[in-house]
Image: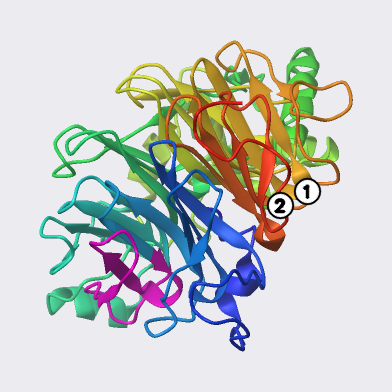
Amino acid sequence: MVFAVAFVTSACSEEKYEEKFAEGQIDLPDDLYAVTAIGADHVWAAGYFGAIYRTIDGGKDWRKLDTRKLTDQSIYDISFADEKNGWAVGRRGFVIHTSDGGDTWEQQTIPRKPAQHLFAVRAVDANIAWAVGDWGGRYYTADGGKTWEDRSFFLTPESPQWKYLSEDELAAVARGEKVYDDIFLNDVFFADKDHGWMAGEYGYIFRTEDGGQTWERGRIKGTVHFDDISFPKGERKVPKDRWDQIFKAAEVLAERPYLKIEIEGYLTADELRTRKDTFLTDERADEIQKFLENEGINQDRIKIKHPTPLDQEGVDMKAFAQTKVTPDGVVKIEVIETPFLFDVKFRDLEHGMITGLGGVALESSDGGRNWEYLNTGSKQALFASAFAESKLIAVGEKGLRRISLDGGQSWQKLGDDGGYGRFPAEKHGYFRDLTCGTPTVCWMVGQGGNVLRSTDAGTSWYEMLPKPEQAPTTGAGE
């Protein structure tokens, strides 16, 4: 469930692989990207070159499953509804399905040409599953994958990107063809057949309560708010009494590169009569942009909204000017939340957590309608999270591990010197995915074929692959 940033190279380049081990033998040539568990003992881990590994005894014995006849592409996610029925998805839109726990697999087809990468799949039950991926990809099956429906995001005249469509794309729409929205979805999670959530790039969060018939956009509560900045009559320089507010806001903005800024200038009716044009609104917006850039905010993060058209031919400038008039000549500054999100999980129908790039962690206590930031104490990417009894666990790049004992209000390092719990020494690679088969038995997978297990709700972790530690090997508890 971690793709565009974490392993963009592997997602775009050709993979070369030579089979060195027979089916059933353990061969870990490279990274594992996904893990899923049913109960304490049944676990499947998947990753490079179509590899899937399974244990049915809590990690004591492992078997490499036979998927090479169907794909040698990277598997980006795997999900089982029960001990028998599951799906795996990955590069170039491939989908494979099993109804016997992974002993045999069949290829299935997503209705999308050309095929786009699939980054996540969620098996709701033996028949229902959802898959998501690149370019607005959302796909649904209700018959065990015999047929998949394309429920992707499509561009419509109401979409913000509509105005950027080329003449060829507009002609395609007129012919009834689909034009997909440029939405990158990294993960999907369903608590039951009705309640589901999706998350992806640029702060995209969606929720459904009717099995995906309709989707509602989740709201991220902002960390920075600007009051309107009023300007003296005819003036374009930023008033000195507002400098301190901008300085303080810029400090937060500089630390959070996922925050974007939209600036729009206005003028009064008297100023419009005096100037006879709206260029003062642009000058005021430009001054705010320069101010922020001087405080270290990259210009790529700043957008001037509705500037005066330079090419005014065919534009009703009188009507445009009226949209730029306010009682006070102000500049409105809006901070847009655009974190890159990797993973979404819910403990129940109300309480959820999302992790992402830059140490981002979000929590919701109202079913995903609203989300607030948690302070994880890290700026490294958090690729996955899990609920374990009353604890929250998150893992990420460069061996990043965090655990919270108070619902995310505070976080501790997991297993490091001075941290909380136990973790194998010298495990500093990327950890890609994390799941709990029961409230106490949890698993994480990552770089170098690492598979780790905890049977005490994430406090103590032991290596199961590639070099098993001397530790309990059943789901009975440590």
Is residue 48 shown above or below 306? below
Using the numbered discs, state the Cα–Cα distance from disc 2 to disc 1 in whole angstroms: 5 Å
Residue occupying the point 53% across, 44% down:
341
| Residue pointed to by mark 1 | 398
- Residue 94 magenta-drawn? yes
Is residue 436 shown above or below 383? above
Is residue 393 shown above or below 5? above
Badge 1 amino acid:
Lys
Secondary-structure class at tag 2: loop
Q: What percent of the width, then of the height, locates residue 293?
A: 79, 42
Q: Of residues 444 and 110, which is closer to you in this image?
A: 444
Q: Of residues 30 and 471, which is closer to you in this image?
A: 471
Residue occupying the point 26% across, 53% down:
130
Query: Residue lying furthest right in this view?
Result: 417
Magenta span covers which residues? Answer: 89-117
Location of residue 210 by image quarter: top left
**Drawn side of residue 49 relative to residue 137, left or right:** right
The reply to whether residue 178 is in sight is: yes
Location of residue 180 by image quarter: bottom left
Q: What percent of the width, then of the height, locates residue 121?
A: 35, 55
Q: Are marks 2 and 1 in contact (CB under 8 Å)?
A: yes
